[in-house]
Amino acid sequence: MFVLVVGGGKVGYYLTKELIESGHEVVLMEKDRARAAQIVDELGSIVVAHDGCEGKYLGEAGSNRADIVAAVTGDDEDNLVICQMAKHHFDVPKTIARVNNPKNEDLFRHLGVDEIISPTRMALGSIEQDIPVHELLHLAALDNELEIIEAQLQADSPAVGRTPADLVIPEGCSLFAVVRNGVATPLRTDTVLQEGDKVIAIGRADCERMLHDQLIGQTEEAGA
Amino acid sequence: MKFVIVGCGRVGAALAEAFDNAGHEVIVLDISTRAFDRLSEEFKGQAIRGDGTDEDVLRRAGAEGADVLLAFTEGDNRNTMAAQVAMEKLSVGKTIAKINDPVRAAAYAELGIATVCRTTMLTDAVLAFLDLGKTGMPSVIAPVPHVHEGAEVSVASPVAPGATPAHTHAETRRA
């Protein structure tokens, strides 16, 4: 297959290298002459030292016979334009764009980009998995060391099935609202808490450990 | 009418003033607040710092449903992207993007964006002044009307009541 890679940054460089190693025909476009020369030294004369966004050079690099165009520069708008020019002007069968702003993924697909690579989305995905969900969330810090805190009740929360009256709420702290199925209501003393509820509390920062025990559950450390 | 201008350079600022003077609602965006120094003291529109290719920024600025969006930053690709975000995501009626690469300008006219090409305009102006003819390319390229499955989508009047041809166009293309 003939693959045209646009953008000789880290992604473009390693992509080109891998593609060559697996036996594909590759041309890399990199507008920075110094960077282009450096890649020529390492990978051979497969580099076109011109801006792949410029219609003239995209054509000269052979986009009209490319099977795939991969736009992997650091700028979303450049990648979009490269893919659109490739697709609509040079009839390239498959276009791939790197997208940095996750909000653009949808738009790019809608505008005809065939494949999206989103480093931000990938990183976000693995970070979100690592964030413990069993923690209190700090929503806002007020003055006088007061904080607004949210606790999402999991199935193993000791507060599930109980009312605020059953809980031991530390002095100087108040549970004031519950968000259930996206609807916020004032938390009354007889509200029976359910799994999935988000309980909103206000209190001094030093009440946090007790709130944690009551709403999330005792950690081993806290229980010791 | 409501105008959104992305890029407060010389042209963007001049257009913002002109629309404002004509009594229109004007929102002008630029990534640099210094660019707004080009606007006069009397300018009554909104000047908002932000990236006009970012859907969220445009939405917060109030670009949704604007009659016209003009993308006049220094970058051809930023302009095409801003124009396409406006059309596809924000239901803006008409978009005009400045694209200085004549090849790209012609290609995007085919994708439904009116384009202005400074390269062609200046070349033509000089050629005309020297009485040497023309490049043969229009300086403002109106979007090419598309014909899909027998139905003509006129992009010259982009917003038909209750329909957004931009979407029709893209969806037909994808199908």
Image (cartoon, coloured by chain):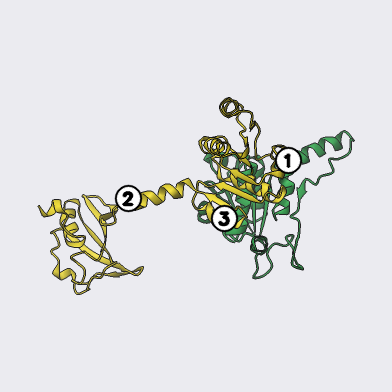
Chain colours: A yellow, B green
Residue placed under numbered mark 2 in the picture: A130
Residue visible at 11% across and 55% down in the picture: A223
Secondary element under disc 2, as helix, strand or loop, is helix
Residue placed under numbered mark 1 in the picture: B118
> In the depicted view, which residue is nearer to us: A101 or B3?
A101
Secondary element under disc 1, as helix, strand or loop, is helix
Quadrant location of residue A193?
bottom left
Residue placed under numbered mark 3 in the picture: A107
Foreground label between 3 and 1? 3
Is the residue B69 above or below the residue B149 in the image?
Answer: above
Figure quadrant of the N terminus of chain A: top right
Cα distance between the residues tagged 3 and 1: 27 Å
Quadrant location of residue A26?
top right
Give the residue type that dot 1 points to: Arg
Q: Residues within 10 Å of mark 2 (few under 14, many from 20)?
A: few
Let me know if residue B7 appears in the view.
no
Give the residue type that dot 3 points to: Leu
- Percent from the top left, x then y, of residue A108? 58, 53
- Percent from the top left, x then y, of residue B99? 69, 44
Find the residue positioned furthest to the left.
A224
Q: Residues within 10 Å of mark 1 (few under 14, many from 20)?
A: some
Cα distance between the residues tagged 2 and 3: 28 Å
Instruction: Tell me which chain the residue with mark 1 is part of.
Output: B
